[in-house]
Amino acid sequence: MDSSFRTTPVVAYFGGPSLVGIYLIDELLKRGCRVQIFDEDEQTWQKGALLLKSNFGLTYGTGKNLFSQSFDYIFVSTLLPKVLGTGKNNFGHFDQLMSVAVKHLSQQGKIVVALPLICYSKKNLEEQIIFEKYLSKNYSVRAIYIGDVFGRGMDFYDNRPISKILLDCIKKKKIIIPGELTPVYPIKVEDASKEILKVLFSYWKKGETRVASGIVNYGNLFLNLKNYYPDLQHQSSSIKNQSQLLVNLPISINKKIEEKTFEEIISWIKSRVESQSVSPKIIKFTRKHKKMPYKRLKIFLATLAFLLFFLASPFLLLLFSWFTRNTQTAVVAKTMFIKWTYVPLVGQKFVPLVEASGLVEGMSRILNRSKEVFGLADTLTAGVLGKQKFELEQVSGKLYLELDSLYKEASFLESDIVRAPLAKLLVEDTSELVRIRGYINSAKEVVKALPDLISGEKPKIYMVLHQDSGKLRPTGGVISSFTLLTFEKGKLINLEVYETKKSDALLKGFVKPPEAVKNYLKVSNWSMLDSNWDADFIESAKNAEWFLEKELDIKVSGVIGIDESVESITEADFLSTRLLGKKLLDLALERHLQFYLHDSGTQSALSKIGFTGSVSPPNCGVGCPTLWAGLNEANIGQNSKSHEISRFSRFEINIENNKVSYTLAVNFKNNADSEYTSYLRAMSSNKSIYGSIKIIESQKSIFIDPEITGDSSKIEAGVYFELGPGKEKTIIFNWSEAVSALKTTGSSAQIYLRKQAGSVGDKVEIVVKPQSGEIFTDPRFELTNEGTYRYNTELKRDFSANMNN
């Protein structure tokens, strides 16, 4: 995504879980940044990340998928002290890392490299030379040199001078010093992370280098420590100090850090010594006390009750936050579980509970973000429909940013669900979250284009087709009337309703209708009333636009198709975009609401989530064919109502060598007192070869050759039939197509049955006959005694299932 639309900075972190890195990431997350870690050893990082107060907004990458986006800031940690108990950084060579990093930085971005101030190895010198090469070529690359870091979580056995001094002092051993005038460069980890933050987010002159370190010599350090610990001893070492500075220290050392060095070291050592000297008081019970005194018993029971409550409290908080979606409660539960992970031997058992708390925290954040989205949507709706002036671009811009943040948080939550062991207990079906992310992403694109859709230099007009589903037609019903909506400067300024027959009376000239319309509707001149003969709403909408221009000389920017089900939306629904949005989403998914807009970006976004009514079966990838069908029914009678007809369909797929045979049988029952006449078409792949249509009525069968039509996306086989009052009739379509991809074991396919617009949940049965062996489907089909797989449902929406041999 373009970094100009981001609401929070995105920071890439390269390197292992160093002590400075953990504290830095904690500060970045607290400031609302998104942090993506790139390190080959994710398991080690997850252990180091337990020190974080919150990991919301933290994701992991690997060397194989280095960059999927540009970053606002890139932080590179090289050979800094690691966290106690974690491994080394396995990322790779520093020069390769820098080469890739500078290519994936946003235009205003910055790369900060943290290098050790002290050189303890030849590798330090090599990386310093490499860094200076990139610094001379790219002014977006900056360095900060870090002294010997100490603080909570440090490793005392990493052979650094400050580590040895602190360990000897805590254990009250003799301090080994290489020479009284030899300098040491200590800095508290909190101060180091704050200095790095200043470098990341503040202005920086070209060529400037920062140092985060204090400076003392061994002699002065020992004398100051001895003032607090008189028994402390030291011993001079004959071993020469091999370390050297990687940068000219006096140029920019922070004097405030230097002045605090003694105070911080002594304060930190004091806290460590005192924490180790505290031991629990042991209460001994002798045989003389056969019964515990009443007061002591009360204290004991109260203490026991407190301990039990303390142990149960994080579980109770987690449950409470799950049911109430309270973010703060989830954070508290997570913090308590994190502390439990430090318990020896059993600490790792609580890591899944930390992850579960993080999931609840993420869900709560999404819920709170959703409230912000709906609030802005209410403002937008009121502004467009109301009379008061409002800034469309400002409100839609804020709504776009909120939707973008909501999409990102849903993405982070999805990745956390995949990793967390307890995720299935909290989230049963992740596919729903994937669908919601798709809806959010499409909503983003629509909101982004909204100023162009309903504003601009000229008024924008949209045509709404009112389709009577009682007279079922391919896109929902007969076009009984239509409405023209006019928008200007982001507001609805006019709404006019027209009767289709009166508009058609203004049509001049002759328009040749499709053959089926001519033969069965008995019309010689085509008009808007019957213009939706194509099941693909986009094609039918273009026809309606053409007739509108010829009849009323009006051009529109798009067409919206609705049927009688949309009438369930009331005026009260417009007072809450949450209720309105839910109803509109259901209506669009059930194909009672369809869109064709001239704006290509918006149309593409709506097409991805199936809101355009196009005949476009889903694509499951290379070597994965889609086995699909659809019905296209047109009520062509004068008085019959489509709602008075009961329908039951059976879609059978028979997988054979190099081909698939299909049978689509539809049973009709007329519950009305009048005759029902219809033109029925089966739709399928453009590679389909149809056989004769079989019609069964009163246990008698006849065979009819289908009327074949089609285009580049589909082939249709049509048949006309009549059904008397109280009668039943079954119409059976048969066809086949060559499909070689299902021949081998392990192959995949997708089953798809398209729902007709305007219909309301007809019962269907899908049956699969595999060539041999077992198949696996999602959703799961029932295996019958005949060796077929069967699934029954009501076709309220398109049906789709994945199948594997």
Image (tube, helix red, strand yellow):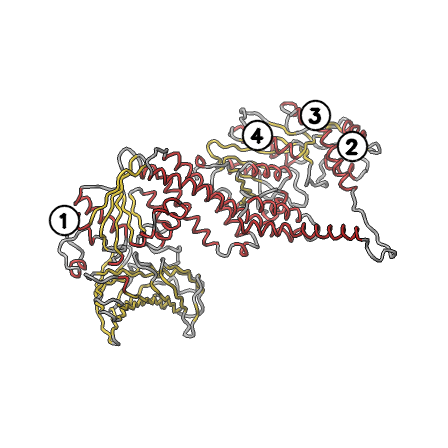
Which secondary structure lies at badge 3? Answer: helix
Which of the pair 502/143 is nearer the observer?
A: 502
Residue 199 is tagged as: 4
| Image coordinates for residue 451, horizontal then vertical, percent | 34, 37
Q: Nearer the viewer, mark 1 or mark 3?
A: 1
Q: Give the Cα distance between marks 2 and 3.
A: 22 Å
* The C terminus - image quarter: bottom left
Q: Residues within 10 Å of mark 3 (few under 14, many from 20)?
A: few
Q: Give the Cα distance between marks 2 and 4.
A: 33 Å
Mark before the other along the chain sequence, 2 or 3: 2
The furthest residue to the right: 288
Q: Nearer the viewer, mark 1 or mark 4?
A: 1
Q: Nearer the viewer, mark 2 or mark 4?
A: 4
Mark 3 belongs to which amino acid? Glu
In contact (CB < 8 Å): disc 3 and disc 4? no
The furthest residue to the left: 509
| Image coordinates for residue 165, horizontal then vertical, percent | 76, 35
Mark 1 belongs to which amino acid? Ala
Residue highlighted by disc 1: 505
Which secondary structure lies at badge 2? Answer: strand
| Image coordinates for residue 402, horizontal then vertical, percent | 45, 40
Residue highlighted by disc 2: 177
Which secondary structure lies at badge 1? Answer: loop
Q: Nearer the viewer, mark 2 or mark 1?
A: 1
Mark before the other along the chain sequence, 2 or 4: 2
Mark 4 belongs to which amino acid? Val
Image quadrant in which you'd find residue 647:
bottom left
Q: Is residue 415 toward the left or the right of residue 87 in the image?
A: left
Which secondary structure lies at badge 4? Answer: helix
Mark before the other along the chain sequence, 1 or 4: 4
Residue highlighted by disc 3: 259
